[in-house]
Image: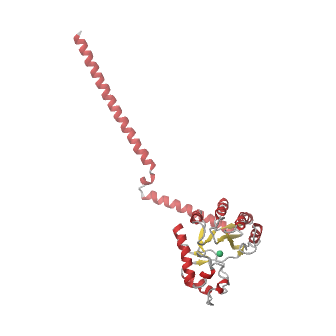
């Protein structure tokens, strides 16, 4: 009886030992598999790091270039088929109505150009830039008596607004518009009979800037004091080819007219573009 019991206990121990060894082995495999799948999962999360073959990188580059070329071709086709191109430009801001204007432009997916000054919030210029509009320069002070009293004063003031824009956007703005336009006569009052505009129009180009005037005047700085008049001044002067429209985003009635201008333009076959260095400059005749 005693012997049988001992044998039974031994058998139990042996069975337990075998079972625990089997369990141990199974557990080892299970943990190994889990660890391996974790490594695979982690790898899958960083596909870029795994693309160590130059062939893959080259292919991705080609695909991106093809997409870009396709977009450019589509854009060129849209421009070629358009009745005309409208370049909406807004001077003297940022102002109190610029954010509302940016909302309208965003809604219609239209890009415009802002000739900014020293006024307004940096955040608004940042938004203009971030949303794909052209941020251009219009002098910091917009003070005729100062900027047109000497070449040095003009460039000191232009540099000041250029610095402001660069601090906000990180980029050098090379598109400018003279206060009053290149055809202005107001500079005669302050330039000591030096015909300053004749010098400045040459000098800005020599310094790597491109200046833009306009060929459609909304007259929002003149007699147009309501959005109906601003709208009709612009809409009635749109024509085939390039239309560089002058508006000021410091006037609420001018900003209010923009949505109708866009809707009218698009309904009549025009496309809206931001100015770039190579856009039509529509220079005025210089009078001073
Ligand atoms: Zn101005």
Q: Position of residue 36 (x, y in %)?
A: 38, 42
Q: Nearer the viewer, residue 61 or 94?
A: 94
Find the residue positioned furthest to the left.
Answer: 3
In this rendering, would 145 be left or right of 7? right
Q: Residue most toward the bottom? A: 193
The image quarter containing residue 214 is bottom right
Above-or-below relation of 194 to 108: below
Q: Which image quadrant: the N terminus?
A: top left
**Nearer-the-camera pick, 210 or 125:** 125
Q: Nearer the viewer, residue 120 or 69?
A: 120
Q: Residue at x 65, y 70 (%)?
A: 90
Q: Is residue 44 left or right of residue 159?
A: left
x%, y% of residue 253? Answer: 72, 66
Count the marks.
0
Can residue 228 be seen at all in this image of the molecule?
A: yes
User: Where, by quadrant of the figure, is residue 205 drawn?
Assistant: bottom right
């Amino acid at each position: 009886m005693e012997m049988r019991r001992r044998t039974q206990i031994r058998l139990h121990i042996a069975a337990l030992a075998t079972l625990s060894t089997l369990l141990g082995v199974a557990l080892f495999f299970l943990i190994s598999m889990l660890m391996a799948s974790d490594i695979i999962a982690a790898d899958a999360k960083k596909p870029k790091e795994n693309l160590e073959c130059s062939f893959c990188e080259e292919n991705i580059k080609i695909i991106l270039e093809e997409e870009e070329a396709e977009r450019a071709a589509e854009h060129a086709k849209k421009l070629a088929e358009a009745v005309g191109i409208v370049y909406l430009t807004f001077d003297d801001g940022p102002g109190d109505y610029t954010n509302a204007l940016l909302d309208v432009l965003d809604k219609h997916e239209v890009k415009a150009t802002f000739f900014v000054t020293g006024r307004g919030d940096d955040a608004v210029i940042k938004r203009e830039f971030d949303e794909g509009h052209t941020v251009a320069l219009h002098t910091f002070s917009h003070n005729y008596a100062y900027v047109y009293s000497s070449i040095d004063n003009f460039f000191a003031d232009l540099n000041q607004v250029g610095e402001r824009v660069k601090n906000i956007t990180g980029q050098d703005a090379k598109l400018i518009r003279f206060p009053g336009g290149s055809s202005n006569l107001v500079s005669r009052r302050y330039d000591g009979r030096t015909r300053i505009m004749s010098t400045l129009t040459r000098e800005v180009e020599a310094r790597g800037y491109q200046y833009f005037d306009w060929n459609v005047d909304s007259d929002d700085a003149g007699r147009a004091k309501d959005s109906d008049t601003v709208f009709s001044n612009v809409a009635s002067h749109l024509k085939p080819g390039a239309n560089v429209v002058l508006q000021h985003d410091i006037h609420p009635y001018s900003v209010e007219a923009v949505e109708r201008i866009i809707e009218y333009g698009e309904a009549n076959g025009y496309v809206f573009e931001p100015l770039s260095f190579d856009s039509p400059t529509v220079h005025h005749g210089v009078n001073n």
